[in-house]
Amino acid sequence: METPTKTKLLTALRNAHHVTEPFDYWLLEDVLPTPVCDAIANLPYAPPGEAVFDGRREANNSTRVYFSPENQKKHAVMQDVADTFRSADTRRTLEAVTRTDLSKGSLRIEYCQDVDGFWLEPHLDISVKLFTMLVYLSDDPALRNAGTDIYDASPEHKLVTSAPYEKNKGLIFIPGTDTWHGFTKRKITGVRKSIIINFVAPEWRAREELA
């Protein structure tokens, strides 16, 4: 069934801007309906109060928020977004745009709220992640420099560029041996809200994180 969320997402995917250096990635605009973006940003979860900032999200695993089946029952917007990404139309479009096979992938969506002190070291996504997409949720101008950083594959992992952090813009890449990304430590004014959408391989162990 074609829903407003699916219609908007499919249009954004078909209009994605493909960049090829230092690796293949895609920049998207107007990814979700505005009310959906707002509903996610207003979910009743506070940013972690005792977060550990060591350059890895895994350091705060106990406080991470996922679009799990349990949470989808609590929040209609989570179910709407999860249903959209689970749909055959969306999966086919993602595969056509990125030229990757997601047929065996399981959906995982995380709601992130990053505050000042947060940073991510340059890293590669683990091999069981088949697909990575980020959608940014805040329209605060103070966060315009808060997009995901993209690095080259040199030993120094030099910063090449940053994805534009603006409400309802997005970034897609297919994890590989050269897809170095992170978030160089810098001042975060406010809360850097986003969702991270992954398709993960069958051997993914943390089944409770799946949508």
Image (spheres, rainbow, N blue to C red):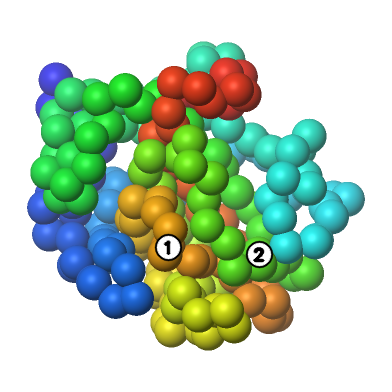
Residue 49 in the image: state x and y as whole percent: 85, 50
Q: Residue at x 60, y 22 (%)?
A: 205
Residue 30, image quadrant: bottom left
- Local SS, label 2: strand
- Local SS, label 1: loop
Location of residue 178 with respect to 83 vertically, above or below: below
Location of residue 210 with respect to 40 vertically, above or below: above
Residue 112 in the image: state x and y as whole percent: 60, 49
Q: Is residue 98 left or right of residue 202?
A: left
Question: The residue under label 1 is which amino acid type?
Answer: Thr
Q: Can residue 37 be seen from the camera position used here?
A: no
Q: Residue at x 29, y 76 (%)?
A: 21
Q: Which residue is mark 2?
A: 120
Q: CA distance from mark 1 to mark 2?
A: 14 Å
Task: Decide which of 193, 59 is in the foreground and name it.
Answer: 59
Is disc 2 surrounded by few (<14), some (14 to 19) or many (20+) residues within 10 Å?
some
Residue 148 in the image: state x and y as whole percent: 49, 68
Q: Nearer the viewer, mark 1 or mark 2?
A: 1
Location of residue 112 with respect to 147 vertically, above or below: above
Residue 206, image quadrant: top right
Residue furthest toward the right? 50
Is disc 1 surrounded by few (<14), some (14 to 19) or many (20+) residues within 10 Å?
many
Q: Can residue 111 be seen from the camera position used here?
A: yes
Task: Decide which of 200, 27 is in the foreground and name it.
Answer: 200
Q: Residue at x 48, y 36 (%)?
A: 128
Q: Which residue is mark 1?
A: 179
Question: The residue under label 2 is which amino acid type?
Answer: Leu
Q: Earlier in the sequence, mark 1 or mark 2?
A: 2
